[in-house]
Image: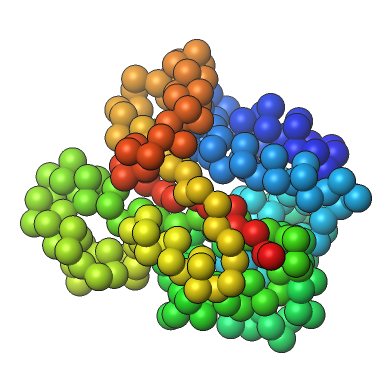
Amino acid sequence: MTDSSGTSASATGGFGVSGLTGPARAANAARTAVVWDALSRLLARLSEDGPLEIVDAGGGTGGVAVPLAELGHRVTVVEPSPDSLAALERRASESGVTVRGVQGETRDLASLFPEGSADLVLVHNVLEYVDEPAAALADVAGITRPGGAVSLLATNAVAGVLHRALAGQITEAQHLLSDAEGRWGEADPMPRRFAPQQLLELIAQSGLSGETLRGVRVFADILPGHAWEGDAQAGQHLVELEKAAADHPELLGIATQLHVIANKP
Ligand SMILES: C[S@@+](CC[C@H](N)C(=O)[O-])C[C@H]1O[C@@H](n2cnc3c(N)ncnc32)[C@H](O)[C@@H]1O
C-alpha cells in the first residue's frame, strides 16, 4: 500500500488486513471488499492532484484510517473514546504511518476543521450511535469541500430482521420489523439501524447528493463460516459474489450494511 491510487491495497483484499492470516483474512476480505472497492475508485478520482485531506468521523481504532494513511493521504480520526484513540496510535505506529487522532464527536467537527476543508469524510457505522443523525450528517457535510465526498456506511434495519429470525429470536425480529429506530428491544446494544430509504432521505436533507446505495455483507454474515473461511478459493469466490451482489436492488434488503458515496455539490 504505497500510492494514493488504492490499487495495491485493493489487491490485498481490503481494510486492516495486515497481520491477518487464513480464515480471519478470508472473513475480513469478504466483509470489506465492497466498501474498499468503492473507496478505491473514489480515491483514484479525488486524488488526481495528490494526497487527500481525509477525516474519519468516529474512526475508532483506525481500521480504515491507517490503511488510508498507508496510501499517503493525510488522515485525522475524530473519536470520543480515549481507549480507541490509544489503539489507533499503536496501530498507526506499528504500520509506520502518522494518523492524527482528536478526541471529539461529530458535533465538534465544525469547530475542529474549517468549513469545506476535507476532501473526503468517512462516517462508517457511526450514525447508529449519535444522538441526532441528521445533525451529525449536516456537520459532516459542512466540513466537506465542494466537489469532495462523504463515505457513509450504516447498519441495515431490514437485514437485522432476517438476522434475528435466523438466530431463532422470532419475537425480536418482529419487534425490529416495525420499530422506528430499527431496534429489536430494550436490550439491543445498537441504538439505531436504518432502512435504505431513511438513509437516502438523511443524505438529501444534509445537502449532499447521494448516489446509489450498495449492499455490504449480503452473504458473508449468513453463510456458515466453515463453508468458506478455511478455503482460500471459496473465500475468493465469496468476495466476487459480494461484489456482484452489492448493486443488486433486491439483495440490498438482506445486506448487513448499506454503503453510499455521497458528493458535496
Ligand atoms: C462501530 S464503531 C465504528 C468504528 C469505525 N468507524 C469503523 O468502521 O471501524 C462506532 C464508533 O463511533 C464512535 N462514536 C460514538 N458516538 C460518536 C459521536 N457522537 N461522534 C463521533 N463518534 C462517535 C464510537 O466511539 C466508535 O468508535
Asked whether residue 104 is in view, the answer is no
In front: 240, or 225?
240
**Would residue 44 appear left or right of 154 to someone viewing this image?**
right
Q: Position of residue 50 (x, y in %)?
A: 90, 50
Residue 173: x and y, percent?
16, 54
Q: Which sits in the foreground, 129 or 40? A: 40
Number of numbered callouts drawn: 0
Snapshot quadrant of residue 120: bottom right
Does residue 144 appear to the left or right of 219 in the view shown?
right
- x then y, percent, for residue 215: 43, 42
* Residue 174 in picture, x, y percent from top left: 12, 57
Rendered position, 175 above or below 23: below
- Kindly give the residue lying farthest to the right in the view shown: 49
Q: Residue 18 appears in which quarter of the rendering?
A: top right
Side (left or right) of 150 relative to 92: left
Q: Quadrant of the N terminus?
A: top right
- Of residues 232 and 243, the one nearer the viewer is 243
Name the residue: 13% across, 51% down.
169
Name of the residue lying farthest toward the left:
171
| Residue under the image location 48 percent in, 59 percent down | 125
